[in-house]
Image: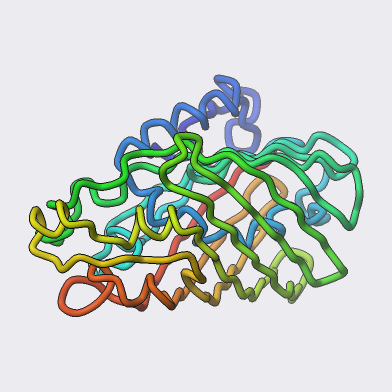
Amino acid sequence: MKPFALFIKNGRNPMVTLKPVVSPLTATLLLAAVVNSTGWAGALDSATSGQDEYDSQPISATTANKIYSVGLGVGAIPDYLGSQNYKAAFIPYFNAALGANRYVRLRGATLDANLLGDRTWLLGPVVQYRPDPFNDVKNNHVDHLNGPGSAINVGGFVGARFDAWDLRLQVVGDTKGNQGVLTTLGGGYNLAFNPALKLRLGLETSYGSGEYMSAYFGINAANATRSGLKTYDADAGFRDVGLNARLAYDWTRDWTFRADAMYMRLVGDAADSPVASGDVGSKNQFFSAVSAIYHF
């Protein structure tokens, strides 16, 4: 579904004004449900979380007085986190400005909200859907794994904005209790070439609890028999370090185009896992996407 398919032209000026046909959040949630059914979100669970505070910077003069934003991105992500194969990903986006720097936002399979009306500090809840990462993947060994299943993760984040710098610490845990906790710390620096063209460069790292690392990178005896991979115990520790970049261009007051790229290097027990090493997987993970976002 294209993002502008959610709108119809105004007959009095069909080339300029668009009117929403349905509630933008409702349409975006429906789109997210369809997109998430393809199972891409497991590899994208935190791949862009370090860039989230860039999304919530005060809007520029080119998009001022706009309350809602809705859009769609398309990109390429690993088949699962640790894979050497890639697949297409569709990323729905919705943001509602609630005044005084507060917002509620859906990006991909992650819903969060900033509850603080402060220009520096951000704080709020996070809800995230993560499908089974090993369901219907290209590698035959990994595809035979009995994966951890889908998960609803809940948690929260705290963030800060200092002029051109931004920071975010996010912690989410599985509500079923068998997939552990993932903590992600990210930060970045924002460059404005002009009022419409901006670049953000960022760093991030994630730390997984013992249950998380075991669920996503461990191989028990039953799964070793099913898949032909060796048994492997993955303990709590840092999962990755990553570099990311985002180029955003406000084409008009109504439209913004973005290009995102990220390189992630798996480390520790995640890097040594049979699903991410040898002929099966890779320690080097790449993510890319382009997005179109409509503001109104």
Seen in the image, is 122 located left or right of residue 240? right
Residue 117 left/right relative to 139: right
Question: Is residue 9 depicted above or below 119 in this figure?
Answer: above
Who is closer to the viewer here, 4 or 280? Answer: 280
Quadrant, the C terminus: top right
- In the shown orientation, is residue 196 left or right of residue 42? right
Where is residue 146 drawn, in percent x and y?
Answer: 20, 46
Q: Looking at the image, which residue is at 54% across and 77% down?
A: 243
Quarter assignment of residue 127? top right
Which residue of the protein is positioned furthest toward the top in this rendering? 22
Q: What residue is rendered at 86% in x and 54% in y?
A: 121
Q: Is residue 124 above or below residue 275?
A: above
Q: Residue at x 45, y 61 (%)?
A: 289
Query: Residue 44 at x, y = what percent?
Result: 44, 55
> Which residue is more in the foreground, 6 or 123?
123
Frontmost residue, 46 versus 198 = 46
- Residue 113 sits in quarter: top right
Q: Quadrant of residue 210?
A: bottom left
**Residue 133, image x and y in percent?**
31, 50
The quarter of the rendered structure image containing the N terminus is top left
Is residue 133 rendered to the left or right of residue 203? left
